[in-house]
């Protein structure tokens, strides 16, 4: 196995990470558009790609020629490019996580607001002046 084979493995890894970066950008767009069906399809694509990345990474890390080439600093430029792409992917993943968190908080606030409005509209008072939620005309309590 020559360093060109090691380089080919790294090129494949970079190709996969670049594809992941694009999927993460697409995911961010779908999250902001709130398109769950497209997001589910993209999530499946991302899962398959992540499994392929993991398998290739395991293959590369066990490859003796790659380890020798790396020790001789023959692959430094490619490894730096891969690391930079990986860092961008990690940053995008963090951003997407924040978008999801903000969306969940917005949904929770909306739910709380709706429940508060519903409870205010169904709030009644008993004969002692205490608040009482429910429909007194139906003798039901919430």
Image (tube, rainbow, N blue to C red):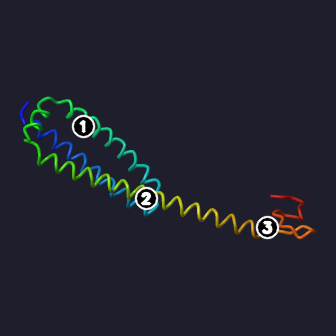
Q: Decide which of tag 2 and tag 1 comes sooner along the chain.
A: 1
Total marks in image: 3
> Circles 3 and 2: CB distance less than 8 Å?
no
Q: Decide which of tag 1 and tag 3 comes sooner along the chain.
A: 1
- Left or right: where 68 falls relative to 103: left
Residue 139 locus on image (x, y percent): 90, 60
Which quadrant does the N terminus fall into? top left
What is the spatial separation of the Cα atoms under label 1 and label 3, in whole angstroms? 60 Å
What is the spatial separation of the Cα atoms under label 2 and label 1, in whole angstroms? 28 Å
Q: What element does badge 2 sit on?
A: helix
Q: Quadrant of residue 119?
A: bottom right
What is the spatial separation of the Cα atoms under label 3 and label 2, in whole angstroms? 36 Å
Residue 85 locus on image (x, y percent): 23, 52
**Disc 3 target residue:** 122
- Left or right: where 109 falls relative to 115: left
Q: Is residue 45 above or below residue 103?
A: above
Q: Decide which of tag 3 and tag 2 comes sooner along the chain.
A: 2
**Disc 1 target residue:** 57
Residue at image position (52%, 58%) is 104
Label 1 CA crowd tier, 10 Å (few <14, some 14–19, many 20+): some
Which quadrant does the C terminus fall into? bottom right
């Amino acid at each position: 196995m020559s360093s060109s084979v090691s380089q080919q493995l790294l090129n494949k890894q970079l190709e996969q990470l670049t594809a992941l970066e694009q999927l993460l950008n697409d995911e961010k767009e779908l999250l902001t558009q709130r398109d769950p069906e497209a997001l589910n399809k993209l999530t499946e694509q991302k899962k398959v790609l992540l499994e392929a990345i993991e398998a290739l990474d395991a293959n590369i890390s066990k490859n003796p020629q790659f380890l020798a080439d790396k020790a001789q600093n023959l692959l430094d430029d490619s490894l730096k490019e891969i690391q930079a792409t990986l860092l961008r992917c990690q940053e995008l993943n963090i951003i997407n996580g924040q978008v999801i968190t903000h969306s969940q908080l917005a949904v929770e606030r909306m739910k709380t607001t709706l429940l508060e409005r519903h409870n205010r509209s169904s709030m009644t008072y008993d004969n002692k002046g205490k608040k009482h939620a429910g429909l007194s005309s139906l003798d039901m309590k919430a």
